[in-house]
Image (cartoon, helix red, strand yellow):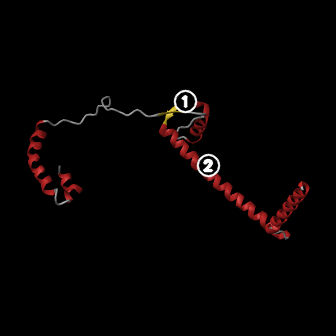
Amino acid sequence: MLRLVNSNLCRNLKFKPIVNFRLQSTESKNAVQASETRSAPTSHHAEVNQIPQQMTTMNPLYKYLVYKFSSHKYSSPSEVPDQLPVSQVNYAKDKGRATMTVILIGATIFGCIVAIFAGKRDQKKGMKHTDDIIKKHSEYSKIHQEMLKKRE
């Protein structure tokens, strides 16, 4: 009960007199009751209501992700059970998603480096990207004009 006086509830000046009055009136009752019935706390695991875990039915992709990224080590995807807790599957999916993101970032950086070196190589040869575009468009326009002449 002493914690209540120091809590955020009692920092509000409106509630402090109410809480102090409540403490004074119940302290004497609690002291008498506590002296009469003191017993060690017991734990009854059978009586505790536990919420059952939600299970996920596994498809081949989930089995592979759990096999590859789960905290439980399985020797092959076929050893992964057909049903697992949702939390375990979500953990494996999140780790797989993060790994795939890192792989794709690396592939993007590699592609950028290849494009840079290809552009530098073409520049040394004297080629320009704009020249290629103009050349392609002029070829397409010539082909298009020839097709129009044939239709007439």
Looking at the picture, which amino acid does disc 2 mark?
A: Met
Outermost residue to the front? 152
**In the displayed structure, does residue 14 sit left or right of residue 150?**
left
- Residue at 24 percent of width and 56 percent of height: 8
Outermost residue to the right? 150
Circle 1 — which element?
Answer: loop
- Residue at 51 percent of width and 43 percent of height: 91
Q: Quadrant of residue 110?
A: bottom right
| Distance between mark 2 and mark 1 Cα atoms | 24 Å
Residue occupied by mark 1: 82
Q: Is residue 26 above or below residue 123?
A: above
Residue occupied by mark 2: 100
Q: Earlier in the sequence, mark 2 or mark 1?
A: 1
Q: Is residue 46 above or below residue 109?
A: above
Q: Position of residue 45 (x, y in %)?
A: 32, 31
- Residue at 82 percent of width and 66 percent of height: 134
Q: Position of residue 143 (x, y in %)?
A: 88, 59
Q: Quadrant of residue 123?
A: bottom right
| Observer able to see residue 17 | yes
* Location of the C terminus (image quadrant): bottom right
- Residue at 23 percent of width and 36 percent of height: 41
Observer-nearest of 28 and 107: 107
Observer-nearest of 10 and 43: 10
Question: Count of labels shown?
Answer: 2
Q: Which mark is residue 13?
A: none
Q: Position of residue 24 (x, y in %)?
A: 9, 50
Sort mark 1 into few (<14), some (14-19) or many (20+) by Cα contacts within 10 Å. Answer: some
Observer-nearest of 18 and 6: 18
**In the displayed structure, does residue 138 sit left or right of residue 96?**
right
Q: Quadrant of residue 132?
A: bottom right
Observer-nearest of 132 and 25: 132
Looking at the picture, which amino acid does disc 1 mark?
A: Asp
